Every structure is written in C-alpha cells, then in structure tokens.
C-alpha cells in the first residue's frame, strides 16, 4: 500500500484547511456584497466543453475512463458559461455568479511521465454585459477582494493588465505569416524566438520594444498611441484604467499595463488580468482572469448576450503568502481527575459550546492538573480547564 499521496497533490493539515476556509469565506463575503450569487459547477464535463473552443490545450486536461469523452475541470469559467447559457438562460442579464472548488490539470514531468495538479479556486463571472462598465466592475471587485484579504506593504501587490485587442492591432502591422509566431514569442517573453523572425529590422526592433513595454498605464498608452495612432480601443482602455486607479492606489496595489501579457489559458479575447504579490523568494500569481465573449458565444444562441468577464483566486497561494496564524481557534481542553467526573466534564464542555467557545474533551481522567496542562499544550490547545475532585 502506498504511504505517500500522488505526485502533484498534498495532504492539508487542520490549520491549512481552516486557513483555506477562512480565505474562501472572506472572498465570498465580498462577492455577496457586490450582488453575486453562488453556483456549483460539476467537477467533470465533456471534453469539448473543457477545451473551451481551443482555449485550453487538450494535453492539460485530466481525462476520465468513461463511455463518454469526459474530463476533470481545469478551471471554473467554461462550466459556468455553459450553465449560464442553458439552465440559467431565462434569468435576466447580466448574471453575477461566483463559485469555489477544486480544479485539476495535467502536465508532463521530466522523463515524459504524466503529473497531475489540484488547485482550490474561488472566483466570479459577470455574464451578458459587453460594456466597459462591466470591465471596470470586475477590476474594482478584484481590488475589493484584495483589500479584504489583508495583504501588507511587503507583499507589493501588483495588478497586471493587458488587452487582446491591443496586441492584435500591433501584430496586424506585420506580414500575416509572421503574426502568429510573433505573438507566441511576445507572450512567452522569448527574445531569441523574436530575433529569428523573418522581419525587417525596424519591425523586429518595435517588437523588442513592445516586449519590454510595461509599467505606468498613462505612459504605456502614450507609447501605444505613437505606434497605432488615436484608436478607440486605446481611449477606452485609458478610461477603464482611470476608473480603477484611485481604488488601486488607496489599497496599495500597483497598476501596471503590459500590452504583451497573456494568461496561461487562451480563453480571453479582450481585457486580461493577473494579480501578483511578492513571495519570500519570487513573485507569486494569486489571481487571474479577463473577458471571454467568444467562449460564451459557443454556448449562447443570442449574440447580444454572448459576453463574459471574470477572475479566479488561487486560495492555496493566498494562504501560503499570508501565512499568519489563525485567530484563536485553539480549543479549550476540558480535563478531569476521576472517571466519576465525566458527566460534569461533559456539562462544562457543552456550556463552553453554548457560549460559542471551541472546546474538546480529554478522552480519559488525568492524575493531576499538571499532567492535564501538559497534555493540553501537546495538543495545541489555548488553555486547559481542570475539574478537580
């Protein structure tokens, strides 16, 4: 019998489980305040749903052995978009939904063996609204959640913002056969691949500058306007970021515009987001998302409602980043000196419970109070209640 969990997963101890639950509850409280309602998408779906129209590489899906082509969900968005367009189709738009649950991905380890990954996610989806106001709402909601979680200055929270439309407009200036490899080189930050493209030196230099272009939104938008001219998308993105900037500044979140940034999954066709914090050694991605109108359009028969924007938090990453002790959830240990006092000990235990105090009962009598307190410390209890004879 194997004594270790499968590669890619880990056992969580009670403190880690409690930490996950607390973070999930904090996020849920923010979502509800903003009018979002909870849904529970299934853990497995048909593969064509999970692949999200080619936005998710089929090699990353964890496939199930079944009569139908099924797999475990690698993220929550595609399942929620499908449900919104079918079971929730009659509800008025926009739909504001949130969900939490485990997601599963597959990757290839060194040596060619398959490795599975499990992640606990919590996120929101705003469906049926194509306006810039919906993008602003999503970003402000993300910032509100960051404020609730209690990140500190040393975490250096940074919200990276990109836009598929901007990147596509920049790439359209290249010969058609070079647009796809140029996009791949930019989004993977691969200067060597960029240098090998069959392009004039002027185009290659511009792409190199674009790869390094990120930072203050106003300055980046100004540079993009020099390259593209005064296009409507630049003005719209400027208005979106201006509506978000005051909240980001108030919460100590750096707002950074990065035209070549793309999330891991290619679900998105508009605004894209990634929230990054500084870990002990390297930056840690704790949330990502964006606009995915085309994905909703795969399920939705009404073109005017084919719109969606959302984000998801990696709860485990947030827990490990914050890593502060839980507030006094250490229980009281109720102990007693003789078996005849068990009934009295149980009465005391229930009295503590009625007062809302976490308490547990020692399973047997102790010789003395010193032994009882020693057992309480060993169990991690906050204090020991001794019932003497």
Image (tube, rainbow, N blue to C red):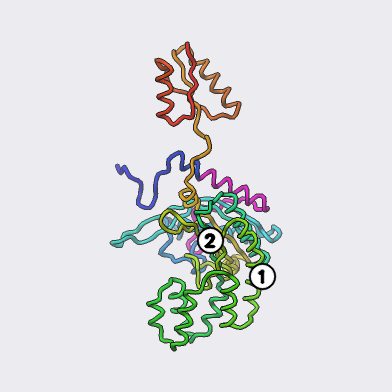
Nearer the observer, 324 or 234: 324
- Which residue is pictured at 51% across the width and 18% down the height? 345
Rendering quarter of residue 238: bottom right
Using the rendered image of the protein, determine whether residue 38 is visible from the camera's viewpoint: yes
Give x and y (percent) for residue 319.
48, 48
Give x and y (percent) for residue 225.
60, 80
- In the rendered structure, which segment of residues is drawn in magenta? 20-48
Q: Secondary structure at mark 2?
A: strand
Residue matched to label 1:
239
For label 2, count other residues whose C-alpha is less than 10 Å away and answer few (under 14), some (14-19) or many (20+): some
Which of marks 1 and 2 precedes in the sequence? Answer: 2
Q: For residue 36: magenta? A: yes
Give x and y (percent) for residue 350.
56, 23
Rendering quarter of residue 169: bottom right
Give x and y (percent) for residue 95.
66, 58
Q: Secondary structure at mark 1?
A: helix
- Which residue is pictured at 43% across the width and 72% down the height? 189
**Number of marks in the rendered image:** 2
Viewport quadrant of the N terminus:
top left
Eyeballing the image, is 162 above or below 324? below
């Amino acid at each position: 019998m194997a004594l270790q969990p499968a590669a890619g997963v880990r056992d969580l101890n009670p403190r880690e489980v409690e930490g996950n639950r607390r973070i999930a509850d904090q996020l849920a409280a923010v979502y509800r305040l903003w009018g979002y309602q909870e849904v529970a998408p299934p853990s497995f779906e048909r593969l064509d749903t999970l692949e999200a129209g080619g936005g998710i590489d089929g090699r990353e899906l964890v496939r199930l052995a079944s009569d139908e082509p099924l797999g475990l969900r690698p993220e929550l968005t595609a399942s929620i978009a499908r449900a919104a367009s079918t079971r929730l189709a009659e509800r008025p738009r926009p739909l504001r939904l949130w969900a939490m649950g485990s997601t599963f991905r597959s990757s290839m380890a060194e040596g060619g063996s398959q490795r599975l990954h499990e992640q606990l996610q919590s996120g929101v989806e705003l469906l049926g609204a194509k306006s810039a106001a919906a993008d602003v709402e999503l970003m402000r909601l993300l910032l509100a959640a960051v404020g609730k979680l209690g990140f500190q200055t040393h975490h250096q929270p940074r919200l990276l913002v990109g836009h598929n439309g901007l990147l596509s407009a920049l790439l359209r200036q290249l010969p058609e056969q070079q647009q796809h490899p140029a996009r791949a080189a930019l989004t993977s930050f691969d200067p060597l691949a960029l240098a090998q493209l069959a392009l004039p030196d002027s185009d290659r230099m511009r792409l190199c500058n674009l790869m390094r272009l990120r930072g203050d939104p106003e300055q980046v938008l100004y540079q993009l306007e020099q390259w593209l001219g005064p296009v409507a998308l630049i003005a719209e993105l400027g208005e979106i970021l201006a509506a978000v900037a005051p909240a980001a500044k108030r919460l100590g979140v750096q707002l950074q515009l990065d035209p070549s940034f793309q999330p891991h999954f290619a679900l998105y066709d508009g605004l894209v987001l990634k929230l990054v914090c500084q870990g002990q050694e390297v930056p840690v991605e704790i949330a990502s998302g964006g606009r995915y109108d085309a994905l909703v359009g795969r399920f939705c028969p009404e073109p005017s409602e084919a719109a969606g924007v959302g984000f998801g938090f990696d709860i485990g990453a947030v827990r490990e980043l914050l890593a502060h002790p839980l507030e006094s959830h250490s229980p009281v240990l109720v102990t007693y000196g003789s078996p005849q006092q068990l009934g009295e000990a149980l009465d005391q235990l229930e009295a503590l419970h009625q007062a809302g105090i976490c308490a547990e009962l020692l399973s047997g009598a102790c010789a003395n109070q010193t032994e009882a307190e020693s057992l309480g410390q060993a169990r991690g209890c906050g204090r020991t209640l001794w019932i003497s004879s």
